[in-house]
Image (cartoon, helix red, strand yellow):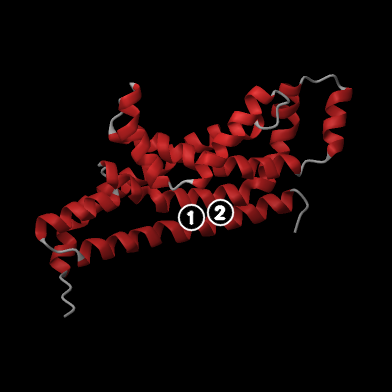
């Protein structure tokens, strides 16, 4: 029988709001790591040095071919066997950052490949070094076409933060589980978690779509 208790909802709302803040922070930190590492992975795979590009390529494929939850367990539980002792928060951020960096590297790659070859030739004629060519000419032109994919992964990383609860990161799902266990009621906390994710994910996706349209218009694209 459906037994919804509004008084219980008002009672647990402050804890869920606080957990929502931690969840957003986890998503933003993980995404920040993913953006930086993803660009590094993309550029490393384009270098002519096989000692660099081949291991990076294999590493990216390995990360993309294994589930995120396994990577979270590996960083947190296996890391100490190699002398890497991390608390839940850093371990979770590293795992989720590495996971999404592998996907963002492909988004960056697509953006870089979309830059006309003439831009490379122009940079070469100006005697720009490869580093200056990438950071002053290529990357600024590669980001706008890649914006849509980057935005999708921002929403995706937010929805994947509940996986961090398996190692004790006190995000939204972990808090809902704790509330349910304490009060022996799971209907309200789980429903509220679903509503909160919708209230954040849907507007974020809409804002990203509008930003993408504006960027494409500035570039003269439809």
Residue 214 position, x and y percent, is: 66, 53
Asked if 24 appears above or below 187 in the picture, the reply is above
Q: Quadrant of residue 58?
A: top right
Per the image, the residue denoted by label 2 is 208
Judging depth in this view, the residue of 39 and 127 nearest the camera is 39
Q: Looking at the rendered structure, which numbered label has been put on residue 15?
A: none
Residue 92 position, x and y percent, is: 36, 38
Asked if 27 appears above or below 185 in the picture, the reply is above
Q: Secondary structure at mark 2?
A: helix
Asked if 10 appears above or below 170 in the picture, the reply is below
Asked if 147 appears above or below 196 in the picture, the reply is above
Q: Quadrant of residue 57?
A: top right
Judging depth in this view, the residue of 214 and 177 nearest the camera is 177
Q: Quadrant of the N terminus?
A: bottom left
Residue at point 83%, 27% (across, down): 123
Q: Residue furthest right?
A: 125
Residue at point 47%, 46% (across, down): 66
* Mark 2 residue crowding within 10 angstroms, few (<14) / some (14–19) / many (20+): some
Answer whether residue 7 is visible to the viewer in this image.
yes
- Left or right placement of residue 87 versus residue 34 in this view: left
Residues at discs 2 and 1 in contact (Cβ within 8 Å): yes
Residue at point 67%, 45% (across, down): 144
* Distance from the alpha carbon under mark 2 to that under mark 1: 6 Å
Q: Quadrant of the C terminus?
A: bottom right
Per the image, the residue denoted by label 1 is 204
* Mark 1 residue crowding within 10 angstroms, few (<14) / some (14–19) / many (20+): some
Residue at point 44%, 57% (across, down): 201
Q: Secondary structure at mark 1?
A: helix
Judging depth in this view, the residue of 25 and 183 nearest the camera is 183
Answer whether residue 38 is visible to the viewer in this image.
no
- Left or right placement of residue 149 versus residue 30 in this view: right
């Amino acid at each position: 029988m459906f037994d919804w208790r509004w008084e219980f909802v008002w009672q647990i709302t402050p804890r869920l709001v606080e957990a929502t803040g931690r969840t957003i922070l986890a998503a933003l930190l993980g995404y920040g790591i993913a953006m930086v590492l993803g660009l590094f992975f993309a550029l490393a795979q384009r270098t002519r040095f096989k000692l660099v590009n081949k291991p990076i390529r294999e590493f990216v494929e390995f990360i993309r071919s294994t589930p995120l939850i396994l990577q979270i367990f590996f960083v947190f539980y296996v890391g100490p066997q190699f002398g890497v002792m991390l608390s839940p928060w850093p371990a979770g951020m590293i795992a989720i950052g590495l996971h999404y960096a592998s996907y963002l590297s492909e988004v960056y790659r697509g953006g870089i490949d979309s830059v006309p070859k003439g831009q490379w030739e122009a940079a070469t004629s100006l005697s720009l070094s490869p580093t200056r060519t990438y950071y002053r000419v290529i990357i600024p032109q590669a980001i706008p076409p890649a914006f849509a994919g980057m935005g999708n992964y921002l929403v995706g990383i937010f929805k994947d933060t509940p996986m961090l609860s398996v190692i004790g990161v006190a995000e939204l799902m972990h808090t809902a589980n704790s509330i349910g266990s304490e009060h022996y009621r799971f209907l309200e906390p789980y429903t509220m978690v679903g509503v909160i994710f919708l209230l954040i994910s849907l507007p974020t996706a809409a804002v990203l779509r509008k930003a993408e349209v504006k960027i494409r218009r500035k570039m003269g694209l439809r």
